[in-house]
Image (tube, rainbow, N blue to C red):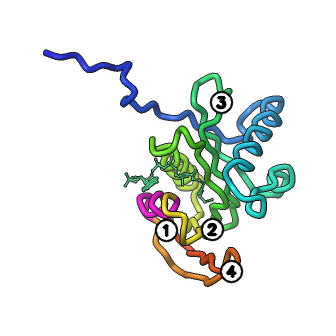
Amino acid sequence: MSVPDCSSESVIATPILRDLTSLPAEKRQPLCKQVGKIERKTFPSSEAFDFDTELKKKNTNMILAFKNADLGELSGYLVYVRMKRLVLLHKICVVQQERGKGVGKDLIHSLRRQLENQGGCQNIQLWVDEDRGPAKALYKSCGFEQIDRCVDYYGPGRNGLKMQLSIGK
Ligand SMILES: CC(C)(COP(=O)(O)OP(=O)(O)OC[C@H]1O[C@@H](n2cnc3c(N)ncnc32)[C@H](O)[C@@H]1OP(=O)(O)O)[C@@H](O)C(=O)NCCC(=O)NCCS
């Protein structure tokens, strides 16, 4: 009988997820710096998130995905804004070499679980560029549905789709 090869690269490790606020204060600043670096590498400057400003805002939170239990290297992050019955999923990003391994889905499921445990939130909403295929695939696979479309939302020729995931009763 053959024994499965657990050292094989096909074995996908589950990322370790933490809320930024749950981490010791001295760890937060270097992590935000790491996030800023990933952000600038991934998004055009007009869309890059200003973490120093945004994370100081009330109700803005970030879930971090780490490659290992030492919480050193990030594989991704998700930023959201909590309102009363609504959460806006502001940004999600997975580092290039970790994509396609379920990290994005884990981040969204983690947010959903948190909101369900807290209670009171009915919907998660977001806007996505119509041309961002991987992001649309991720949102659809997590159960988001398109509820609106805005022509030129992100600039000339770049349409935005508004998507929603209902989680409350
Ligand atoms: C969008 C993004 C976060 C997806 O993260 P990811 O960890 O690679 O996604 P997952 O591995 O969890 O995949 C989730 C689902 O999306 C699908 N998907 C992911 N990337 C895909 C791609 N390139 N093409 C087609 N489908 C894709 C997966 O097949 C999976 O579907 P399934 O559950 O039906 O199998 C990642 O590609 C990314 O960071 N992109 C750049 C930043 C960005 O566009 N962010 C969104 C706008 S803020």
Check disc 1 and report the residue beneath it: 166
CA distance separating discs 3 and 2: 31 Å
Q: Is residue 97 visible?
A: yes
Q: Which mark is residue 86?
A: 2
Q: Residue furthest front?
A: 157
Coordinates of residue 45 in the picture (x, y in percent):
78, 58
Coordinates of residue 16 in the picture (x, y in percent):
56, 33
Check disc 3 and report the residue beneath it: 73
Q: Which mark is residue 156?
A: 4
The disc, 4 or 1, on the residue closer to the chain's N-terminal end is 4
Q: Which residues are magenta?
A: 135-143
Task: State the predominant SS element of the stretch in magenta.
Answer: helix
Q: Amino acid at mark 1?
A: Ser
* Secondary structure under the numbered disc 4 in the rendered image: loop
* Quadrant of the rendered image containing residue 90: bottom right
CA distance separating discs 1 and 3: 32 Å
The disc, 4 or 3, on the residue closer to the chain's N-terminal end is 3
